[in-house]
Amino acid sequence: MGEHLDGQLTDEKLVSRAQKGDNEAFRELVRRYESLVAGTVIGMLGKCAEADDVGQETFIRFYRSLKKFRGESKLGTYLTRIAINLSLNQLKRRKRRSNRFFSTPVDELHDLPDENATAEPNEDREIVQQALGRLEIKFRSVIVLRLIDGYSTEETANILKIPVGTVLSRLSRAQQKLKELLTPYYGA
Amino acid sequence: MKKKIKIQELLYLSFDGRLSEEEQRQLEDALAGSPRLRKEKERIETLRREIGQQAARTFRPFFAERVMHTIATAVKARNGLEKFTKSLQLAFRRVALAGATAILLLMVVNIVRTGDLSVAGALGLPQETLVEVLESPFDATVEDVL
């Protein structure tokens, strides 16, 4: 415990160590999968403080279920499943809040920039993020899993618990919509 | 028009490797004969590439440290709660034991005093039936009370 982990250990070894209470092993897993979980959560919620909270919650849920984790699915897929479900729950909460207190549409709330996001000006990234935020949630989720996280259509269907045919049709429609939104920026 | 839509659908589906040989051939023929469709294909490729490349993939700095801190805080809180629950259980056990001993002592005193070995006697309950209780009128006067 407390030793420096050089990143050479396999996920299985790290999980096994973490299950025995090695917090350094768990920290290494968080570092290893931060970008995957961030891609999913920020893709779904936008770059905002609540995305960071949902990212943390993803790893905390994983920590709590460590003892039950048997490695039947890949760790990345397991974490993505938690991240996407928590993001969808957060979007539902956001929608309820929005309906209750504001007249602002949910899509506009999605575009609210995080105060930290302005510290890293990246116009292209902002444009893509805003375009994603304009998609309906069901379309956004397939785009995030397929194009950002890089899952196959089968894996995407499995994570979202929908048929492969539905994933394909949603992908097709989502790309058409994104093309309309992004063509002004990336040329005709 | 219908054929155009079909080809466009095939074009989108082709990126996810879902075409039959026949559909693949149809798409290739259409691409070979249409500069516009080739341009469309390029556009979709750019779109997919840009989305993949431009997506944000980091949280705020020191993310792992924040996760570990939250976990440590939660574990500490849980341990504190467990400790509190255990001490509460211990305290209740002592109180319960003392209470049971007191009841037992009272029962022994009652039995010795009345010589009645029944449960009612041990518990010091009056030897009256329900009928007797109901039939006896409450005839206390104000003087009795005062």
Image: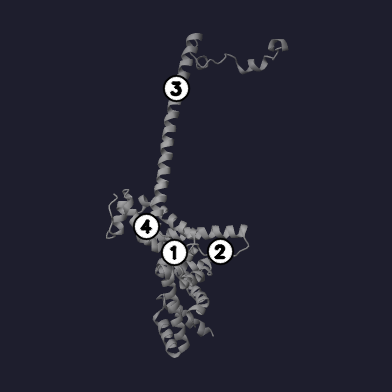
The mark lying in front, picked from 3 and 2, is 2
Residue hosting label 1: A40
Residue A75, horizontal then vertical, whole percent: 36, 59
* Contact check, label 3 and label 2, Cβ < 8 Å: no
- Do the residues marked 4 and 2 share a common chain? yes
Mark 3 and mark 1 residues within 8 Å of each other at the beta carbon: no
Please give left or right for residue B71 compared with residue A98 in the image: left
Regarding residue A71, the answer to whether it shows in the image is: no
Residue designated by label 4: A30
- What residue sits 59% from the left and 60% below the top? A98
Q: From mark 2 to mark 1, how far is it between C-alphas?
A: 18 Å
Q: Which amino acid, mark 2?
A: Leu
- Circle 4 — which element? helix
Tell me the CA gap for discs 3 and 2: 62 Å
Residue A104 in the image: state x and y as whole percent. Answer: 61, 64
Q: Is residue A176 above or below residue A87?
A: below
In space, the residues marked 3 and 1 are separated at their CA atoms by 59 Å
Label ID, residue B98: 3
